[in-house]
């Protein structure tokens, strides 16, 4: 399996190229608009990576603050938003468990395929990590603010098929923390078979690539889970 920590810290450009191929039908932004009114909101994006969610919501929000452990990844956000002449954004290196904003200061917190690294059942303290992250999100949200979490439900599948090590985390969101949930398709559309063969093993490993060697077109199915809840008035 590829070393994701090394990818995030050293391969931001190639990672950005890969995720730019995801969700070619635009289901992520459509789902965000269904879940939350973004217009004029102060938003925080944790585990932001190279900013796929940050850049989607930037045209609608009052402010967007993007945090990630990798400065290398955050530099991509800054470069792309600056190139579009946006000035209402901030990036900062930060752990998911310590969001560097004041209490009751934002309307929406988004988490980008990131809490899973702390809440995988492979981690002996996954429940404690998840509780810490959820409490920290609650701390920074204003009354009636919303949490929106995106995670994988299976790469290479046309129906949800989440990894075993994430199913307890997903159950905890729904059964303990009262999150609503839906699944969407966020398929990858590559420019060519050659590009797909280069980028799939880079992040997902050789085994997944081998499973798609007989594909006739450069499309990789992807199922994504979206979880959301609202903080009630305090």
Image (tube, rainbow, N blue to C red):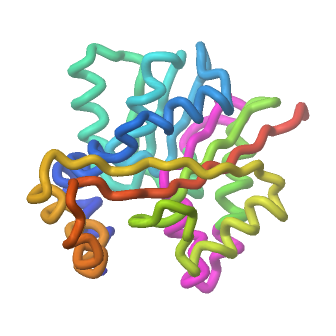
Residue 207 in view (yes/no): yes
How many labels, in total? 0
Query: Where on the picture, by quarter, is residue 52?
Result: top left
On the image, the x and y values in percent for residue 78 come to 28, 32
On the image, the x and y values in percent for residue 10 come to 19, 60
On the image, the x and y values in percent for residue 19 come to 30, 48
Picture residue at 22% right of the left edge, 31% below the top: 79
Q: Decide: is 158 above or below 230.
A: below
- Pick out the residue farthest to the right: 234
Query: Where on the picture, by quarter, is residue 191?
Result: top left
- Pick out the residue farthest to the left: 194
Quadrant occupied by the N terminus: bottom left
Picture residue at 25% right of the left edge, 40% below the top: 75
Quadrant occupied by the C terminus: top right
In this rendering, would 196 be left or right of 169?
A: left
Which stretch did the figure color magenta?
100-129
Picture residue at 74% right of the left edge, 60% below the top: 173
Of residue 53 and residue 95, the one placed in the foreground of this image is 53
Q: Decide: is 213 above or below 55.
A: below
Picture residue at 51% right of the left edge, 46% below the top: 46
Residue 2 in view (yes/no): no
In this rendering, would 53 be left or right of 150?
A: left
Q: Is residue 121 magenta?
A: yes
Q: Is residue 102 magenta?
A: yes
Query: Where on the picture, by quarter, is residue 56?
Result: top left
């Amino acid at each position: 399996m590829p070393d994701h920590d090394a990818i995030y810290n050293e391969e931001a450009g190639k990672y950005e190229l890969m995720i730019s191929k995801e969700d070619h039908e635009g289901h992520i932004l459509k789902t965000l608009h269904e879940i939350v009114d973004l217009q004029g909101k102060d938003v925080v994006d944790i585990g932001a990576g190279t900013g796929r969610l940050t850049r989607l919501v930037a045209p609608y929000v009052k402010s967007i603050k993007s945090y990630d452990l990798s400065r290398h990844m955050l530099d991509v956000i800054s470069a792309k938003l600056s190139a579009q002449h946006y000035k209402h954004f901030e990036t900062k290196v930060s752990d998911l468990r310590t969001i560097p904003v004041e209490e009751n200061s934002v309307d929406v917190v988004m988490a980008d395929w990131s809490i899973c690294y702390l809440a995988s059942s492979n981690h002996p303290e996954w429940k404690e990590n998840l509780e810490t992250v959820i409490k920290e999100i609650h701390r920074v949200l204003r009354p009636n603010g919303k949490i929106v979490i995106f995670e994988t439900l299976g790469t290479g599948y046309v129906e949800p098929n989440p990894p075993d090590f994430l199913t307890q985390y997903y159950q905890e969101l729904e059964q303990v923390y009262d999150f609503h949930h839906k699944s969407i398709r966020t398929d990858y559309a590559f420019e060519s078979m050659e590009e797909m063969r280069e980028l799939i093993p880079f992040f997902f490993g050789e085994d997944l690539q081998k499973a798609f060697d007989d594909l006739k077109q450069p499309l990789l199915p992807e199922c994504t889970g979206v979880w959301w809840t609202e903080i009630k008035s305090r």
